[in-house]
Amino acid sequence: MAERPPVAELGPGADAILRVRDLAKRFGGLRAVDGASLDVERGSITALIGPNGAGKTTLFNLVTGFLAPDRGAVAYDDESIYRKPPYRVAARGMMRTFQMTKALAAMTVLENMLLGAPDQPGERLLGLARHPLGWRRRERDVQSRALELLERFRLSTHAHAYAATLSGGQRKLLELARLLMAEPRLVLLDEPLAGVHRVLGGELLAHIHDLRAERGMTFLFIEHDMEVVMENADRVIVMAQGQVIAAGAPAEVRRNRAVIDAYLGTEAEDAA
Amino acid sequence: MIPLAFSFQSFAHADFWIGVGIVAGIYSIFTLGLQVNVGFTGILNFGQAGFMAIGAYSMALLILKAHWSPWAALPVATLIAMASGLLVGIPALRLPPHYLAMATIGAAQIVQITAQNATGFTGGNEGLIGFDAEWQRIQTWLLGKLSAVGLGQQYELPLFLVTWLSFLVLLVVLRALQHTPWGRVLRAIREDEDAAAALGKNVYAYKLQSLMAAAALGAVAGYLLALNVTLIYPQSFSADFTFIGFAILVLGGLASYVGVALGAILLWFVLEGMRFVDLPLAADKIAALRLLLVGLVLIAVMVFRPQGILGKREEMVIRG
């Protein structure tokens, strides 16, 4: 049987919003990400799957600038973002959430949202010195957008409560709603459904589909629940031991021998 | 039984308490800087006394050696202190939190030791005097005004008024800043800098700004300290100053600027009030006992009101 090379790269005609080539990161002797290459198609909902320790979260951290890669290339919208700091990556329109939700608990839900808005002159000391109250107009615009989004995410009744009072699932919704303030084009979600109540999880998935339909946004999400992956992703990328071992339509990937081996291997280990 | 007695006569001595009020005011301004860093940005600045020293020495040297007018020396000395904040922050703010604390304490030590040893420049341990001629003039003028209301004999009152007026102005500015989107970003960084970075905020730049703001506030405290003792010498700027600042911070409450003033007043009035408790002990033992009492008050605060007098429990964010 002729082995095809890793198939995570899209064909020449396809439109990739994110291209990762030969990305690597070592922690001491551990090759957490070991030459991973993949493409994320614009407008897709792509799932990134793989057994625990496959390097999925590390890959997210490398791509979004939270960790510095040892080697490789990362291009977003055909421009290199390799080793760019997180705030620059975010400013270009690629934003992420975290496995451990980072709702800012000591701030109100509305403040969390306002923080997500870009281009606020009041966030710069020089801007404040020049126009001490100029930011208020922007704040009013931003606030009405924030309230609309909170309405949409069914969080508006909590707008003035500290985010600490929200449930785990609501915090995940807030994290997604907050980054939408910046109108990103690619969103990376690290286990958005982990520990989330089933009803809220369903809501979150519905938001993802709606946002793609309305705004053409692209999503790349890490998920362990295969049912969720098969039902929601148009494309699945599989990682194991720091490398991308397969990619394709959900049904294709499901039948892939390498994928089955990778999962069976860990399942056997888990059972032990 | 330890016989306790208060000598109420000296307790009622106005001049003494005005002096305590000045010290409390200077510590308040000094600790406002710590509040910006620790309470609102979540960075552990243990070098505040160093920035205060740089401000005070720069002011005095510009007046004494460069023969500048104090009105030009004060803003420029403040800028020098801010630049030193930048200089310390550029490497130190890349370090994890505890290392930042060590790096800043080290930087402040360097400042103090330099001041002790660069004798030709700073006067070494003998210090610098004679930088306050303009202040003497203002003081005399203010006392003239005060004598109109029968307070002409309170020689410390002018500095008291200037200190607390400065505090009020800085309080208003800082509170206003805290309610801007800039202040909001600082609070986000305090809680979770990765979350702030993921939302497109340049965390490092904000931390540098926070440290520079603290350095400026330290410098202002340094000017007032210099005017209060009319002498600038290295021992005034020891790390103890920073530690007492932290005690005030905990006492008054994190993330509250008004709390800083309450903490400073409470701490200094307890410390100085102890002087009037007659104990059958040697003076040095009483001095030690006074600091012990501060420790007990702090422990009591941690146990019964961990957020401090005015701190918000919801906003208590202490990171490792």
Image: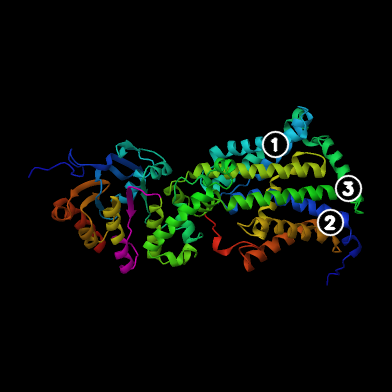
Residue at 68% across / 46% down in the picture? B239
Amino acid found under the numbered disc labelled 1: Pro
- Tell me, yes or no, whether dots 1 and 2 are on the same chain: yes
Mark 1 vs mark 2: which is more N-terminal?
2
Dot label at residue B75:
1
Q: Position of residue B83 (x, y in %)?
A: 62, 35
Q: Are marks 1 and 2 in contact (CB under 8 Å)?
A: no
Q: Residue furthest left?
A: A1
Q: Please name the residue that numbered disc 2 is placed on.
A: B17
Amino acid found under the numbered disc labelled 3: Lys
Residue at disc 3, secondary structure: helix
Q: Position of residue B195 (x, y in %)?
A: 44, 52
- The subunit carrying tag 2 is B
Residue at 28% across / 46% down in the picture? A242
Is residue A197 covered in magenta? yes
In whole angstroms, how far apart are the C-alphas of marks 1 and 2? Answer: 30 Å
Q: Residue furthest bottom?
A: B1
Say if B109 sits above or below A225 in the image. Answer: above
Q: Please name the residue that numbered disc 3 is placed on.
A: B145
The answer to whether any part of residue A268 appears in the image is: no
Q: Which residues are magenta?
A: A182-205
In whole angstroms, how far apart are the C-alphas of marks 3 and 1? Answer: 27 Å
Number of residues whose C-alpha sits closer than 10 Å to that of mark 2, classed few (under 14), some (14–19) or many (20 or more): some
Q: Position of residue B180 (x, y in %)?
A: 56, 51
Mark 3 vs mark 1: which is more N-terminal?
1
Number of residues whose C-alpha sits closer than 10 Å to that of mark 3, classed few (under 14), some (14–19) or many (20 or more): some
The answer to whether any part of residue B276 appears in the image is: yes
- Of residues B19 and B289, which is closer to you in this image? B19
Task: Judge depth for marks 3 and 1 and give the one in front.
Answer: 3
Task: Judge depth for marks 1 and 2 and give the one in front.
Answer: 1
Task: Judge depth for marks 2 and 3 and give the one in front.
Answer: 3
Residue at 66% across / 38% down in the picture? B81
